[in-house]
Image (tube, grey):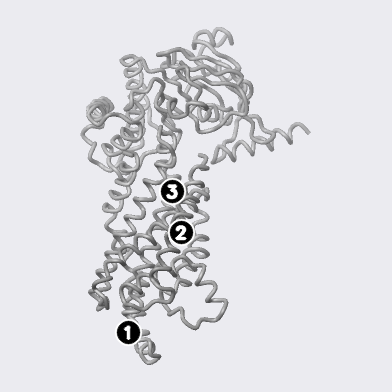
Amino acid sequence: MIRVQNLLKTFGAFTAVNDVSFEVAEGEIFAFLGPNGAGKTTTIKMLTTLLKPTSGSMELDGLDPQVHQNEARRRFGIVFQDPSLDGDLTAWENMQIHGVLYHVPHKVGKQRAEALLKQFELWERRKDQVKKFSGGMKRRLEIARGFLHTPKILFLDEPTLGLDPQSRNQLWTHVKKVNEAEKVTVFLTTHYMDEADRVAHRVGVIDHGKLVAVGTPSEIKEQTKTESLEEAFLALTGSTIRDESAGSADQMRQFAKMWQGGRR
Amino acid sequence: MSAIYILWLREMKRYLRSRVQIAASLGQPMLYLLVLGFGLGPVFQRAGGGSYLQFVAPGVIGMTVLFSSIFSGLGILWDRQFGFLKETLVAPVPRLQIMIGRTLGGATVALLQGLLVTVVCVIAGFRPAHLSTAPLALGFMLLIATVFAGLGVAVGSSLQDMQGFQLIMNFMVMPIFFLSGALFPLDGLPKVLAVATMIDPLSYGVDGMRSVLLGRAHYGAMIDFEVLVVIAAVFIVFGAYRFSKIEI
């Protein structure tokens, strides 16, 4: 469903994504793991047509997202790292706008929006302005919205960031349910290794823009001779702390400077 | 097409829901209208300009439409801040449609604000001299709204965050307002000021409205109309171009 070959993205002298290749099968839940600034979000941005790769090729459901931008966009849903809802509108209106923007027929959209809002336990609050929602509810709404146009692939970029364990647990239960019911391929990033271990069929670990391991969680544990995915992750990426600054582009520049300085 | 409509509808809903903001946005025009209108009235009368309230009302309406439309264009900054912009940019819809939906929405909001202030002006004692041509003022309001909604989108697409907002306010919006002749007649100005007012698009909007509402014009309604149509087209194209270049 997703095929990435020799993907490369550079910002000036800094290489954010360095010769990355992987494949994700249809219906699979694939977790993309890596420390801050490793290249996860940059990869997602390239896959979702928001950023042009420096070189390499990508395929989403057989389509090159660079060439067939709009066709590719119809086939995936995305939940960004930070919120992308209109807080002044109600939950229902946010769904409605999404339906229109993704060319979902009016009637189908209505039925599906109702079913999804019920499934994600937001139906009672559909007429409330989104700005009155809690963090967990907003995330749920975004994910429900991402499923509205029956995408074949759903990208989730750190969807559980800042949520309490209850909300996180509930959120993954919902995502797993839809993944099983509709055979949606899910591509996610997270910093919570236990989540990846629990939800993902396969994981890929990226560090400094390079893919350092791909496989099922148990394969990766075996490979690194560790007990948990967290230990495996630390074994693969080291335990140095990576600082993350506000914007991803700024962050890239900062890293670029850092690495250049380090080499001299 | 439906994408344009839904984004237009979004602007409408947001506008109608922000009652406090609607009320707040009437404050400034009312100050100009009532304080300047009555405060400068006697001097203006003695100088042979007639009623200053009559004179300044079209200017105040023009100012309202200017502020409202340019801010709605700058709304892209808010959407960037709160994230909704991404939702529209990653959707399978050409960016041009998204830009047009937003711009039309912003222009409609500005037009509604302009009408609201027109009502306030009439309550304050403003009376159009020619009722037959008065409806044409609506056309000029719409043109002003389109020109500055386009400019707002262009500027909003070019800024990265809210930091630049104050800069835009002080070095673009306020000068456009003060140089437009909204508050003073354009006749017999010093050379530099005369040139500055001539390159200010709002001058033509205010002059056009004065022409159809009061029958007094500096450039003439036809020239005003032509200039505004050209500038509107240029700004819309420029806004669309800048919008197409946004990177998240």
Q: Looking at the image, is mark 3 or mark 2 nearer the viewer?
A: 2
Can residue A72 be seen here? The reply is: yes
The circle drawn on residue A185 is: none
Residue placed most toward the observer, A23 or A33 = A23
Q: Which of A236 and B26 lies nearest the eye of the viewer?
A: B26
Q: Judging from the image, what secondary structure is the residue with disc 2 in?
A: helix
Split into 4 quadrants, where in the image is the N terminus of chain A?
Answer: top left
Which percent across, then down, holds residue A50?
Answer: 50, 33
Residue A263 at x, y percent in the picture: 76, 31
**Three-letter code, disc 3:** Ile
The residue wearing badge 2 is B230
The residue at the far front in this view is B222
Q: Earlier in the sequence, mark 3 or mark 2?
A: 3
Answer with left or right where residue B248 lies relative to residue A135. right
Q: CA distance from mark 3 to mark 2?
A: 24 Å
**Location of residue A133 (image quadrant):** top left
Q: Is residue A63 above or below residue A138?
A: above
Please give the name of the residue rendered at 28% of the width and 71% of the height, measured from the top-left corner. B133
Can you say which quadrant of the picture contains the C terminus of chain A? top right
Q: Nearer the viewer, residue A25 or B1?
A: B1
Residue A240 visible at all:
no
x and y percentages locating residue B41 in the rendered image: 34, 85
- The circle drawn on residue B76 is 3
Residue type marked 1: Ser
Q: Nearer the viewer, residue A61 or A68?
A: A68
Dot label at residue B51: 1
Q: Which subunit holds the residue at mark 2?
A: B
- Furthest-bottom residue in this view: B46
Instruction: Give me the C-alpha separation between circle 3 and circle 1.
Output: 40 Å
A166 vs A156, left or right, is left
Dot 3 or dot 1, earlier in sequence = 1
